[in-house]
Image: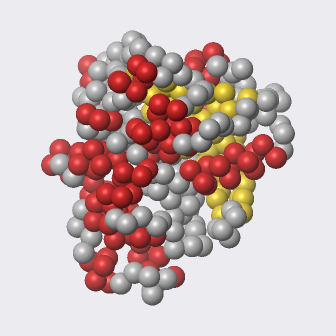
Amino acid sequence: MPLVTSRYSPPHFFKNGHISTIYAGLVRQVNGFSQQRERIELMDGDFLDLDWSFSKGKSDRLVILLHGLEGDAQRHYITGSAKLFNANEFDACAVNFRGCSGEPNQLYRSYHSGATGDLTEVINHILENKKYRSIHIKGFSLGGNLLLKYLGEREGVPKEIKAAVAVSVPCDLHSSCEQLLSSKNMLYAKRFKRNLLQKLRQKQKLFPELISDAEIKSIITLKDFDDVYTSKAHNFKDAMDYYTSCSSLQFLETIDIPALIINAKNDSFLGTTCYPYEEADKNHHLYLEVPAYGGHVGFWGKNNITYTEKRALEFFIKNSG
């Protein structure tokens, strides 16, 4: 599809990418909302925690929500989305990736940008109940990349899955990593690395034979983390093999349901190859919207409802099947 013209025009203050990113991540609050947790067992013996919220009436429409790097189902971009969908007759299932629900997962492996097997198990679990006629999926950042990879790497998705929206997506993981390693993103990268190392030290206590103190001390950058842990724990040769194998960019041409990507031009986490103009032009199922503003998952909106929350609701209602 041709490039979608964006209607996003925030107040002047939120035209600064860093301000909008920080506001959305650290300042915004979503109140008057509750979730119910369900734990599902995975085929490899691990578990995932799903946080559910429901519309007032009985609904046969569901939205699955996928968070970003070191996020969880209580992040405000997740709860804000779920709250709006619930108010518009959609149930919501917010997925906590392995190790992100407040309790360490049971295996040495955890989650990563291409772990579509876990999403497959979540979808299969939901389909077993035969409750939902239409399922929609919305992913943010890492979760957006995982979502697009899931849609494009298989010949077909379950017929119940009607549409997808991916926000602030690092479609090219190497390009995004290069941006995160640049000086403009130093504070974000430092925060990510601190959280990741804290979890890795927990892993070391459980699996001391798999990771040494020297290896942990060698981690200086986020790429080092992917070389030392992410790649080794998930059967990739190294960080570059992980980035190459799991970038959703290569899977976009085969997506065959309506999928909307919203990536802001001033998203400091995204390199030029994270804007798939050519792929969207060739695939009539793929829509690309590139607002001038928005930062990284930082799209402001009136009444505490963000622009991308409204856009996803609009897109899903249009493509409910």
Q: In the displayed structure, does residue 314 sit left or right of residue 236?
A: right
Residue placed at 35% from the left, 24% from the top?
Answer: 277
Residue 76 can be seen in this image: no
Q: Nearer the viewer, residue 260 or 25?
A: 260
Q: Position of residue 133 (x, y in %)?
A: 79, 30
Q: Residue at x 26, y 29 (%)?
A: 266
In x, y percent, where is residue 75?
50, 45
Q: Residue at x 34, y 42 (%)?
A: 172
**Hey, which residue is sitting farthest left in the picture?**
183
Asked if residue 250 lies left or right of residue 111, the reply is left
Q: Is residue 261 above or below residue 249?
A: above
Furthest residue toward bottom: 209
**According to the image, what is the colour scheme of the structure?**
secondary structure
Residue 84, percent from left and from top:
61, 28
Quarter of the image holding residue 248? top left
Query: Where, by quadrant of the figure, is residue 134 drawn?
Result: top right
